Amino acid sequence: MLIELLIAVCLLGSVGVFLLPDRYAPRLSFGISVVAIAVSLYMFSAFDGAGNALLEGGKLAFETNAHWLSLGPYDLSWHVGLDGISMPLIVLSTILTSLAILSAWTPINERKSQFYGLMLLLEGSLIGVFGALDFFVWFIFWEAVLVPMYFLIGVWGGPRRKYAAIKFFVYTNVASLVMFVGFFLLVMGSGVTSLGLPELAQQLATGSVSSVGGLSPQQVKVVAFFAMFAGFAVKVPVVPVHTWLPDAHVEAPTPVSVILAGVLLKMGTYALLRFNFTLLPEVAADYALVLVAIAVVSVLYGALLALAQQDLKRIVAYSSVSSMGYVILGLVAFNLYGLGGATFQMISHGLISGLLFLCVGVIYNTTHTRMVGDMSGLADRMPITAGAMVAGSFAYMGLPLMSGFVAEFMVFSGGFSATFPHAQLLTAIAMFGIVIVAGYYLFAMQRTLFGSFRVATDYEITRAKPHDIAPLVVLIVLIIALGSAPELIFGMIQDAVTPMTELTHTQHAAMGSMELRDVASTIGGVVR
Amino acid sequence: MIAAKYYLLLSAAVFCIGLFGILTRRNALIFLMSIELMLNAANINLVAFSAQHGNLSGQVFSLFTMALAAAEVAVGIGIILVLYRNFDDVDVTTATSMRW
Amino acid sequence: MAGPLEFAPAIAALPFVSFVIALFFGRYMPKKGALAGITATAGSLLLAIWTYFTVMGNGEPHTEHLHTLVAVAEPFSLELGILIDQLSALMLLIVTLISFLVFVFSLGYMNDEGETGLPRYYAGLSLFSFSMLSFVMASNLFMAFMFFELVGLCSYLLIGFWFREDAPPSAAKKAFIVTRFGDYFFLIGVVGILATFGTSAFIGTGGTESFPALAEHALTGSADHVHTFGFDPQTWFTILALLVLGGVMGKSAQFPLHTWLPDAMEGPTPVSALIHAATMVAAGVYLVARMYGFYALSPTALAIIAFVGGFTALFAATMGVVKREIKQVLAYSTISQYGYMMLALGAGGYVAGVFHLTTHAVFKALLFLGAGAVIVAMHHDEDMWKMGGLKNELPVTYYTFLAGSLALAGIIPFSGFWSKDEVLYEALRLGLNDPVFMAAYAMGLIAVFFTGFYTFRMVFLTFHGEPRTNIAESPHQYGWNMKAPLVVLGALAVVVGLINMAPLAKLTGMDLTYLHHWFENGGELLTVEHYHHLLTEVSGVHHVENSTGLMLGSGALSLGLALAGVAVAHVLYNVPSPEEHTDKLGSIKTVLFNNYYQDEYQVWLAEGLTANVARAANTFDQGVIDGAVNGVSSVSLFAGERVRRIQTGVVTNYAALLTVGLVVLLVAMGLLGGWF
Amino acid sequence: MTTRPRLKLGSHLLPGLAAVALFTVMAAVFLQGNFPAPAGFGEGSVLRSIGMAMFALEPSIPSANFLVAFEIIDVVLVAALVGAVMLARREGNDSSGSVRTDGGRGDDR
C-alpha cells in the first residue's frame, strides 16, 4: 500500500496547496515533497522485490493487485508494484521534485498556489507511471503527466511559452496515440483478456501471436513494436523526433526543466524498456541495426547540435538528446551491462541534467540571461554556483567517480559485447560523443564562468541564497555517491534486468538477418 | 390499384419542389411552406407503403406527422417572429451569427 | 607479508584527506591548506620510501582488493585494487617526492606572492597527488583509466587556476579536449580489453589471469574465453594496443596530440613542474610500462610507439630552439624527452624507458622549479630576452639549474646522460635489424644535438651575459622554501643516474646496473626477463648482440652530439649581449615559432570544421526537422482555417450541401448497387 | 399592381439545380424499381380501421399500438403552442429597447 500512500500524499498535498493562499504554498509543498522523499526512501530501504516485474519469477515489492472493472473483453485491475528498475526511478522522482520545488522559491513569484500544486500533481502522476503494472492504470498516469506539464510551461514559461507548451502537448499526445494503437494490436494478437503487463509479457514469452486484421503474426509484432517505439521515441526523445525538447526546455521555468529533463525523459526510456524490449525482445533483436543507428545518430547529432547553441538551456537540452542515445544503445545491446547501464544512465542523467539545469537557473535568476555571449567571469562573483556547474559539466562528460562515468562505461561495455553486426564499430562511433560533450561544456564554461567579469544585462550579481545552493549540493553529493558506489542501486537494477537477458538467448542467432530493406518491405506490406 | 412506384414518384416530386423552395428562396415564411411540402412528401410515402404492405401503422404515422407539423409550424412561426424582431427582416441569409 | 604494504592505500589516501581539508577548511588555516598538503605528501613520501624498501626485500608483488564498483557474475566486474610491485613502488617514490617538494616550493611561489584562491590551489594539487598515486597503484586497466581521467581533471583545474584572465581557461580547455581525444581511444581500448579478456587486471590473482597473460596464451596456444570478435588474435591485440596508445599519446604529449602541453604552461609554475613535467605527463609512458606484457606481444604496436617517440623527440626539440619564454622551452623539451621514453619502450628497452622516466622526472621538475624561481625573481616575466646575468644574483638557482640542464642535455656524468644513452643504445640495437627502428633511432640521435643546443641557449640567455632589463639587474629574492626543493632536486639530478650505469658496468665489469636488477625481481610475469622473453619468442623482435664496442660507440656518439649542441649554444649565446641568431633561419624560424602550424590545423579541426558542421546541423535541425514538425502543424491549421469557411451560417448553403451530398451518395450507391 | 408571379432565380439557380438533380436521380431509381402488387386493406372502412388500429382496439387489424405516442403528441402540441406564444410575445414593456443581435455586423447599416 506504500505506492498508493506515496501517490495519495502527492495528490492530496496538491489539492491542499491549490486551496491555500499563495504565501503558504512554497513551504507547504516543499514539506509535502519531503514527506514523499521520506516515504520513498523508506520503501527503498524496505525493498524486497526480486527479479523483473513483468517476467516469470519476478517478485514485486509493495504490490497491490485488485480487480477494478471490466471493459469489453478486457479485465482492468489496479495493479501496482515495484521491481529493481522502477524503485530507483521513484526515488529519483521524489528527490528531484523536492529539489525543483526548493529551486522555485526564488524565480516563481505569481500564482504560487497553482504552481506548487501542479508540481505535486506532476510528482504523483510520475510515481504512478513508474509504479503501475496494468496498462490501463499506467496509461492514465502517462497521460496525466501531460496536463500539469502543459500548464507549468504554458503559464510560467518564457516569451514563447504558448508555442512550446502546445508543441510539447500535441507532439507527445500524438505519439501516445500511435503507441496506444501499437499496444492494442499486440494485445489483440496475443489474445490476453487482461491488460496487466505481466500477464501480457508472460503470454508473449510462452504463447504465439495470432494474426490480426490481415497482418501475419510476425507483422503484428513488428508493427506493434515500431508503433510503440515511435510513441516512446518522442518522449525520450531520439532524433528525429526531438525538436519539442529544446523549445520546451528553453521556455519552461527552471524547476520545470529540472523535472522535464530529470524524470519526464526517463518515462520514455522506461517505457521502451518495459514495453518494447521486455515484451518483444526478438523484434528488437531482428531490427537491432536500425535501432542502433537511431541511437548513434542521436548521440552524435545531439552532441553536434549542442555545440552550436548559445543558450545554456539549449545546450543542456541537446546534450540530453545525446545522453538518451546512450540509453537506447544500452537497451539494444540487450545484455546485462547494456540494460543495466541504460537503467543506471537514466538515474544518473536525471541527477546530472537536473544539476546543470539548476545551475543555469541560479545564474539566470541573478543575471536574467542565459546566453553564453552575454556573460563571462561569473566564477568571480558566484564561486559556489560556478563550482557546481563545473562539477555538473564534468559529471556530464563522464568523469570517473561520478555517476555518469559508471553509466556510460557500462553502456559501452554492453554495446561492445553485443551480438548485433558491427557492434564494436558502432559502439566506438557512439563513444565519440564523449569528446564532443567535453567540447561544448568546456566551451560554455570558459565563456560564461571564466575570464574577466562582465554581464550584458544590468542586474546586480549577488551570491545565490542558501535555498538555491542546497539543491546543487544535494545533487553533487548524490552524483558522487552513485559514482563511487554504484552498487547502491545497481544491485537491484541488475537483479531486475538479468531475467530479461535470458529472454532472447535463442533468438540472437537470427539477429541481423533483417536489413533495412526488409523493414521497408514489411512496413509497405502493412500499409497495403 | 396504382403501383407503388408512382406514389413514390409523386412524393419525390413534392419533396423536390419543397427542396427547390428552400434552396432558392430567402424568405423564412416560404421556408416554412417548403418544409410543409417536404413533410407531406414523406406522408405520401408512408401512406403508399401502408397500402403496399397492408399494415395500418403507416396511415397512423402520417396522422402523427401532421400533428407534429402543426406543432413545428407553431414553433417555426414563433422563431420567424423573433428573427424579424432581431434582424428587421425574415431573410434567412441575414442571420449568420452562427458561422465559423 | 604484512607491514608497510598494508598501509599502501594510505599513500594515496593522505593527499585525499588534505584535499578535503584544503577545500572546506583551507581558508581558515594559516597557510591556506598548504600545511595540510605538505604534511600529507610528507607522510606519503615516508610511506612510499618504506614501501620501496619493503618491495626491495620482498620478491612477490603485493596485490590488494579495495572496492568493487560494480559486481556482476558475468561477464566482468569493475573493481578497484592496488598492485605494488617494483615498477609502481619506484613510481610512487618519484611522485610522492616531487609532490612533496612542489608543495614546499608552492609556499614560496604562491603564498609569499599573495595569491588569492589558495585553498582551491592546494585542493587541486592534493587531488592531483591522490589521483596520480591511485593511478600508479592501480591493479587493473579500468581503474587506471579512471584515475587517468581524474588527473586530467586536476590538470584542467590547475592550468585554469588564474581563471580571471583569458588565456589560462582557454589553455585548460585545450588541454582537456586534446587529451580527451586521446582518452576516447583509450576508453575504447579499455572496453575492448574487458570485452576481449573478461578482465583488465595487470596481474593474475587467485586463479584468474591477467590480460597480458591471456593474450600471450591466445597467441602461443589457444586460450578459452578470449573473444577477438572475428579478428585474428594478433591483429586484434595490435588494434587494442594502439587504441590504448591513443590515451598514452594524449597524456604524454606525443605527436600529434602534443599541442596542449606548451599551452598548459599558462598554469602556475609549480603545477607545471609537478603535473606537466614530472608526473602526469609520465602517466602515459608509465601505462605502457605497466602493461608492457601486452605491448610486447605486438611488434606493429612497438614499431609505431618507437617511431612516434623518435619523431616526437626530434620534432619537439626543433621547436624548442626558437622559443623566447623559458617555460615554453622547457615544455617542448618535455615533449621531446617523453618521445625518448616512448622510443625506448617501443624499442624493447623497458628498463631504459623507466630509467629515463625516473631521471627526467627529477631533472625536469628541477628545471621547472628553477624556472619558477627565476620567474618569481623576474616579477613574473618569462621572456628570456629580458633576463641575462642572473647567475650572480641567484647563485643557488643558477647552480641547481645548471645541474638540471647538464642532465637534460645528456652530459656525462649527470643523470640524463646515463638514461638517454641507454635509450639510444636500445634503439640502435634494434635498429641494426630493422630499418623502422633505425629511422626512429636516427631521429632520436639528431634530437640530442638540438637538446644540447636549446638547453644551453636557455641557460646562457637566462643566467649569463649582461642583464638586459632593470629587473634582471636587481631581481626579487626569495626564501628557503623555494631554495630547499631546488637543492634537493639538484643533488638528485647529479646522482640519480648512478642507479644504472650500463656503459660503465660494461667497461669496468662491475655490477652497476642496479635498476636492471631491480626489475628482475617481482612477479613472474612482470619482470624484465619475461618481457624480453615475450619480445623474442612471441613477437620475434630481436636486438643485436650486446657488445662493449657498440655500447661505447653509441654513448660516445650521443655525448659528442650533445657537446656539439652545447658548444654551438656557447658560441652563439654565451656572450655579454647575445643577438637573436634564430632570426637568421628566416622562414624556417617562422615555421618553428608557429610550431609547424600544428595548433592551427587542430584549432581549425575543432573550431573551423566542427563548429561549422555543428552550425550546419543546427540550421538543418531548425529548418528541416523542426520545420517539418511546424509544417505539419501549419498544414492542419491552414486546412482548418479553410474548411471552416463552409460554415457560412446561411441555412440555404447548408441545405444545398446536404442535397448535393445526398445526390452524390445516391448516385454512388445506385451505381454500385445496380439500381439503374 | 400585382403581376403574375415570376421565378426570380438569380444566383440561386445552382442550388435549385441540385433539387432538380435529386428528383432526376430519385425518379430514375423509382421507375426502374419493380414492386409486387399492393396488399391493400381488404374490406370495410379504412377510417374505422385506422381508428381501431391507433389504440389497438381490434387485434385482428395489423398495426402497432400508438396509445403512448398519441399522448406524447398531445403534450408536444400543447408545448409547441405555448412555446410559439412565448416566442411571439414582445418582451417586457419597453417596446423600443428590445434585444437585438446584429449577426456580428456591427452598427454600420
Image: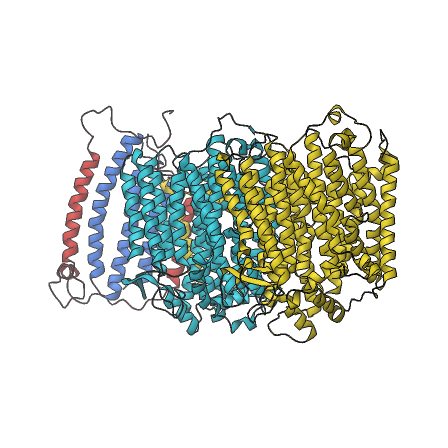
Chain colours: A cyan, B blue, C yellow, D red
In the picture, the quarter occupied by the N terminus of chain A is bottom left
Q: Is residue A349 left or right of residue C295?
A: left
Give coordinates of residue D73: x percent, y percent. 17, 51
Return the residue nearer the eye: D18 or A452.
Answer: A452
Count the numbered circles shown: 0
Return the residue nearer the eye: A455 or A7.
Answer: A455
Give coordinates of residue A88: x percent, y percent. 41, 55
Give coordinates of residue C493: x percent, y percent. 73, 46
Q: Is residue C591 left or right of residue A230?
A: right
Q: Is residue C240 left or right of residue A7?
A: right
Q: Is residue C570 above or below residue A485?
A: above
Return the residue nearer the eye: C558 or B12.
Answer: C558
Return the residue nearer the eye: C315 or A61.
Answer: C315
Report if residue A300 is visible in the image: no
Q: Is residue C36 above or below residue A62?
A: above
Q: Is residue B79 above or below residue A437?
A: above
Report if residue C657 is visible in the image: yes
Residue that sits furthest to the bottom in the current view: C221
Q: Quadrant of residue C248?
A: bottom right
- Write the residue at 75% across / 68% down: C539
Give coordinates of residue C516: x percent, y percent. 73, 61
